[in-house]
Image (spheres, helix red, strand yellow):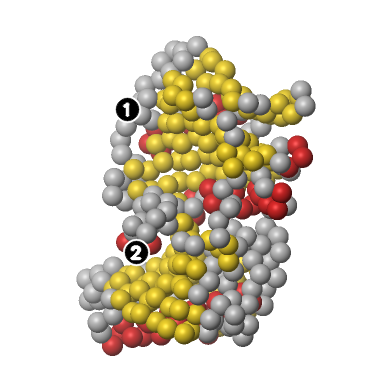
């Protein structure tokens, strides 16, 4: 069983830019904005090449006597503009006071400034770019880190000249449907949320070999095979192995495009960007993401090993997802499983001796 590569969406870029990984409809990104006295987040959403949204959220602060603010602007733009972001229409939601008008103007400024600064950078590969710039909205001299894995403006972080983070990515995601409220209800994530307490008891079990095509991994008899390529450890963890076919036009950057998609938040399950770890080795990418679901308070740790196979026509993908409270108490058990994974290439074993 093979799956078609997931990058076959309608893809676009910010006006006047060429993106190494084009945006797709429904992609968004949220930042922690430390330029405000109160806790604040700012998000941007890409609908299509002529429609965007920006949202500012700040919780009520009794100490500073400030109310909750939740302001969203929906903007129509000219996609053919070469000079910068050219607005052609706007709808505002949530603004009720004069101070809210200042927030709206701030969001306008960020749209203009981020677009203009991104247009001046050449991101033609997956490599990050550090750019020292003067940025009035953030106090003068700053360092902007551009990253092609980040949607829309490709900005991962802005630091002051003293190295302090002013504006940093908190999550990025993709709306899965017109009813997906992940962008409109997000209120920020501080640190690593605590998962629910779960009772997982390891028992003495016999090792078993789990196989799917050329992919193999060592599990034990506590794991039960649910489908041809799917294994379940009671209600605590799930493991899958998949092979994807890569279209000819995607071969040169298929791994990078896939990595960006697999790290994204979906359907009220938020990927926590500061917790992410990525390791790149030749034809393999290992990535660990932590996902948080505010409604259920579930926290999961998601491990993926992405391998571009010989001739670049297929990609092998291993996914191991574990509730974080179970993982934290059983790290060595799950690490051993990950380190047992290998792929046969032309009769030879390609081992992954360590994950992180």
Viewed as shown, does residue 57 lie left or right of 50? left
Residue sitting at x 41%, y 38%:
324
Residue 202 in the image, given as x and y percentages of width and height: 41, 20
Q: In which quarter of the image is residue 64?
A: bottom left
Front-most of 276 and 159? 276
Viewed as shown, does residue 64 lie left or right of 213? left
Counting residues from the start of the chain, the first of labels 1 and 2 encountered is: 2
Front-most of 76 and 104? 76
Residue sitting at x 50%, y 34%:
320
Disc sitting over residue 199 in the figure: 1
The quadrant of the picture occupied by the C terminus is top right
Front-most of 105 and 74? 74
Query: Are there few (<14), some (14-19), or many (20+) residues within 10 Å of tag 2?
Result: some
User: In 3D space, how far apart are the residues under numbered discs 1 and 2 (Cα atoms)?
Assistant: 34 Å
Residue 249 in the image, given as x and y percentages of width and height: 70, 53
User: For the residue labelled by badge 1, is the local secondary structure a helix, a strand or a loop?
Assistant: loop
Up-down: is 151 above or below 4?
A: below
**Do the numbered discs 1 and 2 sit on residues whose CB atoms are within 8 Å?**
no
Report the label total. Answer: 2
Residue sitting at x 68%, y 52%:
250
Query: Are there few (<14), some (14-19), or many (20+) residues within 10 Å of tag 1?
Result: few
Residue sitting at x 50%, y 68%:
48
Up-down: is 52 above or below 345?
A: below
Up-down: is 342 above or below 9?
A: above
Q: Can residue 159 be seen in this view?
A: no
User: For the residue labelled by badge 2, is the local secondary structure a helix, a strand or a loop?
Assistant: helix
Q: Can residue 19 be seen in this view?
A: yes
The quadrant of the picture occupied by the N terminus is top right
Viewed as shown, does residue 211 lie left or right of 120? left
Residue 20 in the image, given as x and y percentages of width and height: 66, 62
Pair 1/2: label in front:
2
Instruction: Read off the residue under disc 2.
Output: 184
């Amino acid at each position: 069983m093979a799956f078609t590569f997931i990058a076959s969406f309608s893809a676009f870029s910010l006006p006047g830019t060429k993106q190494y990984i084009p945006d797709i409809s429904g992609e968004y990104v949220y930042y922690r904005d430390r330029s405000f006295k109160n806790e604040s987040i700012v998000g941007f959403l890409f609908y299509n090449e002529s429609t965007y949204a920006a949202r500012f959220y700040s919780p009520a602060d009794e100490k500073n006597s400030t109310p909750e603010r939740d302001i969203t602007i929906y903007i129509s733009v000219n996609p053919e503009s070469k000079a910068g972001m050219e607005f052609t229409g706007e709808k505002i939601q949530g603004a009720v006071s004069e101070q809210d008008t200042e927030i709206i103007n701030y969001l306008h400024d960020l749209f203009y400034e981020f677009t203009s600064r991104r247009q001046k950078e050449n991101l033609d590969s997956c490599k990050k770019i550090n750019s020292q710039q003067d940025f009035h909205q953030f106090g003068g001299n700053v360092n902007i880190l551009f990253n092609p894995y980040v949607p829309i403006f490709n900005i991962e972080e802005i630091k002051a000249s003293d190295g302090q983070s002013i504006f940093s990515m908190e999550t990025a995601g993709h709306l899965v449907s017109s009813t997906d409220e992940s962008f409109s209800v997000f209120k920020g994530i501080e640190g690593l949320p605590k998962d629910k307490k779960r009772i997982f008891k390891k028992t003495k079990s016999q090792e078993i070999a789990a196989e799917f095509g050329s992919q193999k991994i060592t599990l034990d008899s506590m794991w039960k095979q649910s489908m041809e390529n799917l294994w379940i450890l009671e209600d605590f963890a799930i493991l899958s192995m998949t092979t994807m076919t890569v279209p000819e036009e995607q071969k040169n950057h298929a791994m990078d495009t896939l990595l960006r998609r697999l790290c994204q938040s979906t359907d009220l399950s938020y990927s926590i960007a500061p917790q992410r770890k990525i390791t790149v080795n030749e034809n393999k990418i290992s990535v660990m993401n932590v996902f948080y679901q505010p409604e259920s308070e579930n926290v999961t740790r998601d491990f993926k090993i992405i391998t571009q196979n010989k001739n670049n026509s297929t990609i092998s993908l291993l996914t191991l997802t574990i509730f974080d409270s179970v993982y934290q108490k059983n790290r060595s058990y799950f690490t051993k499983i990950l380190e047992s994974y290998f792929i046969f290439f032309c009769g030879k074993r390609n081992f992954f001796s360590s994950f992180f």
